[in-house]
Amino acid sequence: MSAFEEVVITGVGVCSPLGHTAADLMQALCRGESALRPIDAFDVRPFACQTGAAVTGFKAGDWVSNRKNLKLMSRAVRYGLAAMKRAWADGALDQATLDPERVGMFVGAGTAMGDSGDLLPALAQGFVGERFDLSTFAAAGVPRINPLWLLKGLSNNALGFGSADLDARGVNQNYCNSAAGGLQALGEAAWAIAEGLADVVVAGGADSALDPAHHTGFSRLEMLTERTGPDAVRPFDSSHDGFAPGEGAAFFILERRAHAQARGARILGRVSGYGASSAASLLPKGDPEAIAQAGRQALGHAGWQPADIELVYAHGNATPAFDAQEAAGLGLLFGQHRPAVTTNKGQIGHAVAASGPLSAACALEAGRLGVLPGVPSLRALAPECADLNLVAAPREGPARRSLIQAAGIGGQISALTLEVAP
Amino acid sequence: MSRPRIVVTGMGCVTPLGHTVSATWDALIEGRNAIGPIQRFDASGFVTTFAAEIRDFTPPPLEGRAARWSDAKGQFAVAAAQEALADAGLAQTGPAPHRFGVSVGAEVSRPELGDMALRLKAALALPPQEALRGVDPKDFVVMSAFFPATLLAAVFNARGPNLTTSTACTSSSQSIADAVRVLRRGDADVMLAGGTDRLVEELMVMGFGLLGALSTRNEDPAHACRPFDRTRDGFVLGEGAGFLVLETEAHAQARGARIHAELMGYGWSANAWRITDSPSDGRGARASMTAALKDAGLAPDDVGYINAHGTSTQQNDASETAGIHGAFGAHAQRVPVSSTKSMMGHLVAACGAVELIACVKAIQTGVLPPTINYEHPDPACDLDYIPEGARSAAVDVALTNAFGFGGSNGSLVVGRYR
């Protein structure tokens, strides 16, 4: 019997550019909506990429118990707290009935760039003519910086604030692994349940690529689309030219099956397998063998064959290089079986560490509805991706067993398999 | 289902006390201090002007892109990992790539402040598009927390699971525990696990100084880090890396590897409190130690040495002491506890790994490293902190703690292999 038999999903919380529940997100995706818009989160004029997908209709204050902490929270952390608490409510969990040391939290977090807000003006105080002088900066610049400056840049703030708000005192982790981190958090959390280390784990990812630091980085790596309009991002299409920055969060309540049953919880499905690998390369390019290896490991733990998979949520970042590698990797993994493949990055952008968990939330909802979500921006598959069974328009179809892929720019690959409850 | 035993077959470290395990260990048992005035930059204007710096470090021989892309913490990581792999007899022929994974505790890199200020000033004088073209494409990758794990995977051809934990001071304790988890479930045969960090940087001295977390004993840096002493006034920034080669017992035996020790268990908990403080009852510390003992299948009395987190802040040392009482009961009064941070400062994302290595050496050599600078007993810290200098003691099992900003706690238990 698979170690994962006892790991069930009892709640999902989503914060995305196309909706604040998994159901709303899936409906918008299947209606063909796109959240891609001109970026207004920062001055985007110097950049070739002008298009992004922002979370809208969101008030951070609604989700933070101590409002004083808001100023320490980045966009990503705020989305994370909202998604955690939505998942908690969706799972109908009640702190009064839980042992806090048996409640865990696993987070996939983004690259925390900190708040340059008051650092940059302070740096200007450090110049003596053309020379930057540290003691001048220390005397004249540092007093202008908020004493809590360092705390806003902590990479584990979603975990720190989230665990305090939900009184989750058990096992916990914070992975900073680019886009691979969110699924790693889910997979490692599932293992924590399987190993008996917790009754309940809140697991997922939160991130935002909508800031100048990420935009500069991804621009210089030539990974961003230069097109505009709602169909700018075209995963696996012959006109693919990169992704648009996105943001958001998705968290799940993973629970020991017996614990869920004892409290009469609704069981949405289960995490059935997880795999991780590395391309062992410094360059942010894909690696078909690494992609296939992570998928095989996940299938192995699930006790499934490739033919058991009905829907693949691909990473699909719409860069020509990675799309081709991912298509090749899925070919190695699935062989003759060609499951339906989809991706949401054309419609909600790339939420980096949150992208895997957002796809997992979509996969769970697709399986529940019996729908195969489409990729509306698809015109013609790129020749290197021609073997993919990519869903163009959404259609009815079984999607109870799914595989979700995520790939980080450091060569990390992660894969997760899900099974929707009958 | 029986679970495989996990063993330590290689160790490597770069610390302010020495650039190898043996140099670091010799310094630790001599009670040597590595803390002094900062030489790397002019710190005279900051509230704290001293730290535990790594000096005279020879970067490891790397070629091509790996050489060009390695910053200091990447170099620390590669050097420590090389030593660990050589120690494990894996330097020439590494493990099968797809069965060889990497788990690293690391945080995002910080730019050097003067360089950043000059570059910003120059960029502001240019048209924005031109300034953008001046940004090195590799910077975004190299500065990210995951980069040391990427670098190690590329340099040592490790294509297995690749994980980066960023939980501040607890990072490498948790990354090592993750490696244990990966090995136990059979997703790899060998894991390179540890952490790397570089804290003696302007932005860190400034940021931790602004928080009031650092010792400000500027007139006497050599005695600034005094864990558990009543007059302790904050922690001291350090830097470095520690890596261990972990593998399943069966894999180590099959290749005839020398086994240093058994990694018996780990425990994790969260304070669920505030991001910079721990509750004074030490409940989070107690929970991670208790979980680690349970995972190892041991009783408190089995532990012969605790390498404390012992940061030398008022709050950590008192709450850790309370946590040890909570987890160990009557045995807390008997078990020797020391903080090696008293000598090498706080290696933050790397401390868990380096302090685990100290525990393995203590078991192997029968010598416990001291807590230096301990002079004034504190009623809130009432354990045996090994203040008199290194102590001979036959120890079969040791436990090491790491607690961090954000509230994550990690404990590791290591034992004599038999």
Image (cartoon, coloured by chain):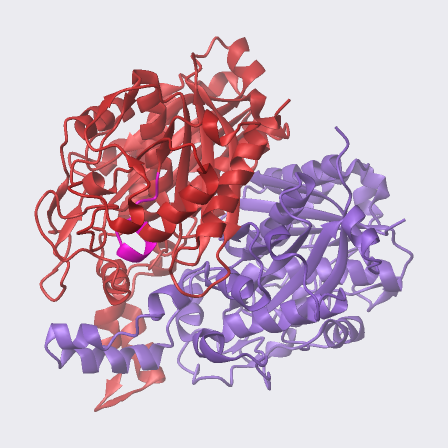
Locate the C terminus of chain A and report the quarter of the image it occupies.
Answer: top left
Q: Looking at this view, is B262 or B287 the one in front?
A: B262
Q: Position of residue B107 (x, y in %)?
A: 47, 60
Locate the N terminus of chain A and report the quarter of the image it occupies.
Answer: top right
Q: Is residue A321 magenta?
A: yes
Q: Is residue A71 above or below residue B74?
A: above
Q: Is residue A137 above or below residue A12?
A: below
Question: Is A129 left, or right, of A7 in this rendering?
Answer: left
Specify the chain shown as red.
Answer: A
Q: Residue at x 14, y 37 (%)?
A: A34
Q: Position of residue A90 (x, y in %)?
A: 35, 20
Question: Is B393 left, or right, of A314 in this rendering?
Answer: right
Asked whether residue B239 is in view, the answer is no
Q: Position of residue B18 (x, y in %)?
A: 68, 77
Q: Position of residue A205 (x, y in %)?
A: 38, 40
Q: Is residue B295 above or below residue A368?
A: below
Magenta part mainly helix, strand or loop? loop
Q: Is residue B370 above or below residue A168?
A: below
Residue B386, image quadrant? bottom right
Q: Residue at x 33, y 48 (%)?
A: A352
Q: Which residues are magenta?
A: A314-323
Specify the chain shown as purple.
Answer: B
Asked whether residue A317 is in view, the answer is yes
